[in-house]
DNA sequence: CATGTTTGTGGGTAAAAGTGGGTAATCGGT
DNA sequence: ACCGATTACCCACTTTTACCCACAAACATG
């Protein structure tokens, strides 16, 4: 099992590569074998799953039936964006052009650890996202975290 | 077992050949021996199964009853269009004319990996298909891309 | 604080991938 | 057997990718 936390500012080079922060590398399960799946996330960011975590998601997709038109749409939509990627010798990962375009990523990224996956943002868009929340961290947390505390 | 994911834009040459994306080739089980079965898919696209996955499908078709008219219809349609094809030296596959016509494929294709099979679309028709579905990526993903779903 | 090591970043180059086309076998029908 | 059409199997070219090497900044260690 892999678990991530923290945020990091990193650069994207001319080949579309980003370095995976050393602190995150330490938290990648050895099962993943330096293999990752990059896909489209929510709110114009990208999700990176180490292979072991992606395998779990794939399990849930497999439960869908190809015979059901609705399920076919779900499978296509989800898998369309998914790309396998392996770390290079410098522990970097290549972000595919289509995904870079989707997330409007250029020279700089914000890398966030969110439990089982890693998020990659255009820093500016992340700021806007935070600003667009018309409620405070404290209030939302109160609503979300309280039931679990009880 | 072969598993596919991702989407790729490739060209179809004058001989009706398409290249199998390298990333997909890596995920073809060695059991398949470069042998594939191409057949009619759902929603005007083509399905390509590596041999090992086709064998599984064939097993499930065998369980259908020839006594049931609906079963007969499905069996006939699926098998009528099915064609075996082998990769050439450049790891390309030839799409039969009848199937190209059925899927309205001309010079460009969108190749989708959908777990156990590969789909081949006329890019325009795929766009139309996606547009015709009254659901968004975000909605679909919300149901699957969360840990609890596993 | 000095020094060896890891980390983040950039770039060069050989290999692989994607694409197009030529030609020799193969097949079907005269 | 012959001929035209189709198919299988090469060869060639361009672009992309994978795999190196290099180096400065940051970190860790005694």
Image (cartoon, coloured by chain):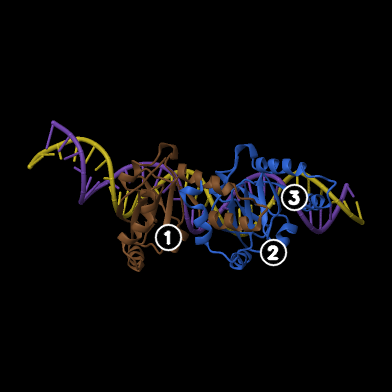
Chain colours: A brown, B blue, C yellow, D purple
* Residue A14 visible within the image: no
Label 1, secondary structure: give it: helix
Q: Quadrant of residue C25?
A: top right
Q: Quadrant of residue B2?
A: top right
| Chain name for mark 1 | A
The mark found on residue B104 in the picture is: 2
Label 3, secondary structure: give it: loop
Query: At which x and y percent is residue A33?
Result: 43, 39
CB-based contact (under 8 Å), mark 1 and mark 3: no
The answer for how far apart the CA atoms under marks 3 and 2 are is 17 Å
Residue at numbered disc 1? A100
* Residue B59 visible within the image: yes
Q: Earlier in the sequence, mark 3 or mark 2?
A: 3
Residue at numbered disc 3? B82
Query: At which x and y percent is residue B4?
Result: 57, 48
| Residue density around tag 3, few if under 14, some if 14–19, many if 20 or more, within 10 Å | some
Question: Do discs 1 and 3 belong to a common subunit?
Answer: no
Most foreground residue, B120 or B60: B60
| Residue density around tag 2, few if under 14, some if 14–19, many if 20 or more, within 10 Å | some
The answer for how far apart the CA atoms under marks 1 and 3 are is 38 Å
Q: With respect to residue B140, does B63 lie above or below?
A: above
Q: With respect to residue B62, does B97 lie above or below?
A: below
Label 2, secondary structure: give it: loop
Q: At 83% from the left edge and 49% from the top edge, which residue is drawn? A: B68
């Amino acid at each position: 099992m892999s678990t991530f936390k923290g945020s990091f500012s990193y650069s994207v080079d001319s080949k579309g590569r980003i370095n995976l922060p050393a602190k995150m590398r330490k938290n990648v399960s050895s099962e993943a074998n330096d293999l990752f799946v990059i896909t489209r996330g929510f709110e114009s960011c990208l999700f990176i799953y180490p292979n072991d975590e992606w395998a779990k998601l794939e399990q849930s997709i497999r439960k869908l039936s190809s015979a059901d038109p609705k399920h076919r749409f779900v499978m296509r939509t989800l898998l369309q964006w998914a790309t396998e990627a392996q770390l290079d010798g410098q522990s970097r990962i290549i972000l595919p052009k289509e995904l870079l375009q989707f997330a409007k990523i250029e020279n700089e990224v914000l890398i966030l650890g969110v439990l089982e996956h890693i998020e990659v943002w255009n820093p500016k868009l992340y700021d806007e996202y935070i600003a667009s929340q018309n409620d405070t961290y404290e209030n939302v947390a109160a609503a979300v975290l309280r039931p679990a505390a009880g």
